[in-house]
Amino acid sequence: MRSSGRDYLAYMLRLWRESGSTSEDGSDWRASLESAQTQERFVFATMADLFTFLQQEVEQACEPERRT
């Protein structure tokens, strides 16, 4: 089984807190990822959104190559 050609994923991760926020549950943290391959930038309002995106990226990379 061949991979989809995405055997390597690299991102620059940036994390920051919203200014003036006093949340104790971590919900005031934001994130962005920038793809090292394409320079495409993705911004996330929650850590859950970030983790969901990363899980989907890994799952997509693991899919077998589709033939047309």
Image (cartoon, rainbow, N blue to C red):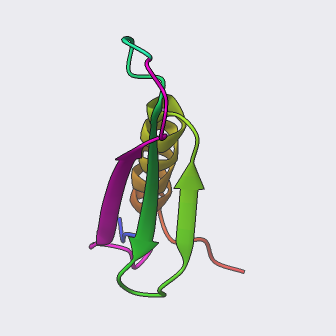
Does residue 13 show up? Answer: yes
What residue is drawn where x is 36% and y is 71%?
2
What residue is drawn where x is 63% and y is 77%?
67
68 lies left or right of 53: right
**Secondary structure mostly taken by the magenta-highlighted segment of the chain:** loop
Does residue 9 show up? Answer: no
Residue 40: percent from left, percent from top: 54, 79
9 lies left or right of 34: left
Residue 58: percent from left, percent from top: 39, 53
Image quadrant in which you'd find residue 12: bottom left
36 lies left or right of 57: left
Residue 23: percent from left, percent from top: 44, 16
Which residue is nearer to you in this view: 59 or 49?
A: 49
With respect to residue 30, does 47 lie above or below?
Answer: above
Image quadrant in which you'd find residue 37: bottom left
The question of residue 34 being in magenta is answered with: no
What residue is drawn where x is 38% and y is 74%?
6
Image quadrant in which you'd find residue 24: top left
Range drawn in magenta: 4-22
**Outermost residue to the front:** 20
Residue 41: percent from left, percent from top: 54, 72
